[in-house]
Amino acid sequence: MRKLGIAAVLLGMLCMVPSTGSAQVKVYWTTSGMFGPFNIQGLIPSIPKEKARDITIPISMWVIDHPKGLVVFDTGNNAAVSDGGCKSHWAAGNCDFLKPNQKRDDVIDMQLKKLGYSTDKVKAVVTSHAHLDHIGNIKLFPKAIHVIQKKELYQAWWPEKFQREGGVFVMADFDGPARDFNYLELEGDYDLFGDGTVTVLSTPGHTLGHQSLRVKLGGGQTLVLSQDAIWMKENLEGYPAGLNYSVKDYNNSISKLKMIRDLENAEIFFAHDQDQFAAKGGKWYR
């Protein structure tokens, strides 16, 4: 009887230990305006003409409410791009091709305000990569911890010569005060809060240090927020994106995210898929 009593106490203690992924996490999918319309072959030239279509795509941003702190995953186009001001901040060619349609209310600070938050309450800003439509507003978060792959930070500040001409790295997004931000410089995957709920996934290929997120909700559902590791469903159908640092790493990263999807029965959310955002964007996941 005594042994049974001890076992019962031990079992009770084990039940009191919180399990991985038990934290109540909320995830909100929003967008920093839209790009387009333009022919999909402008982004994915490998798509054959008979499958081509005109697209108007979201610029995905994510707000993650975790008990240990508020997280923003990507900060979208710079606020200066709003309301027709694109050519004051971006190269004219990118404005003419991408056709950004961003209102000032679409910018991440206003999106947070609509959800009942403020920029100074954000604990961590996770940046998938340093392209103009993903890192544009990190200067709005001087108090946050900025989570980025070390290689990506290097590439942002010192991009290789072959990547400079396209204007996809806009130095004004991350120069000046942003140089002295508190950066958590990663070299691989990272459990953001130490409880398995929000995991940074190293997914290079699109850029040297691209990263995605895996989020485990309290109900057991797993979300994979791919960002530009996977632009849209056509990439999963075998048509690679047209802008990649390394096609080999790009394909390996897609395989990694697909394996997480298959092993954990997860759902992958793409960065720029108009149909998926129309069906699932603009709402909370819990």
Image: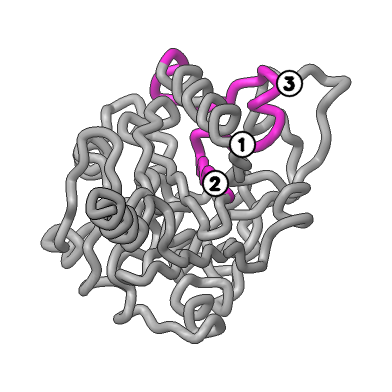
Farthest-out residue, front: 1
Q: Residue at x 23, y 54 (%)?
A: 2
Q: Residue at x 77, y 56 (%)?
A: 278
Q: Which residue is mark 1?
A: 265
Q: Residue at x 43, y 59 (%)?
A: 22
Q: Earlier in the sequence, mark 3 or mark 1?
A: 3
Sort mark 2 into few (<14), some (14-19) or many (20+) by Cα contacts within 10 Å: many
Q: Is residue 167 visible?
A: no
Q: Residue at x 51, y 39 (%)?
A: 228
Q: Closer to the camera, 109 or 24?
A: 24
What segment is highlighted magenta in the picture?
Answer: 221-248
Could you say whether the residue bearing mark 3 is in a helix, strand or loop? loop
Q: Is residue 183 above or below residue 201?
A: below
Q: Is residue 186 above or below residue 80?
A: above
Q: Position of residue 174 (x, y in %)?
A: 26, 57
The quarter holding residue 40 reads top right
Q: Amino acid at mark 2?
A: Thr
Q: Closer to the camera, 57 or 122?
A: 122
Q: Amino acid at mark 3?
A: Ile
Q: Which mark is residue 222?
A: 2
Taking 27 as reference, is 232 left or right?
A: right
Q: Position of residue 129 (x, y in %)?
A: 37, 44
Q: Closer to the camera, 186 or 139?
A: 186
Asked if the residues shown at circle 1 and circle 2 are in contact, with their CB atoms under 8 angstroms apart, the answer is yes
Q: Is residue 265 above or below residue 76?
A: above
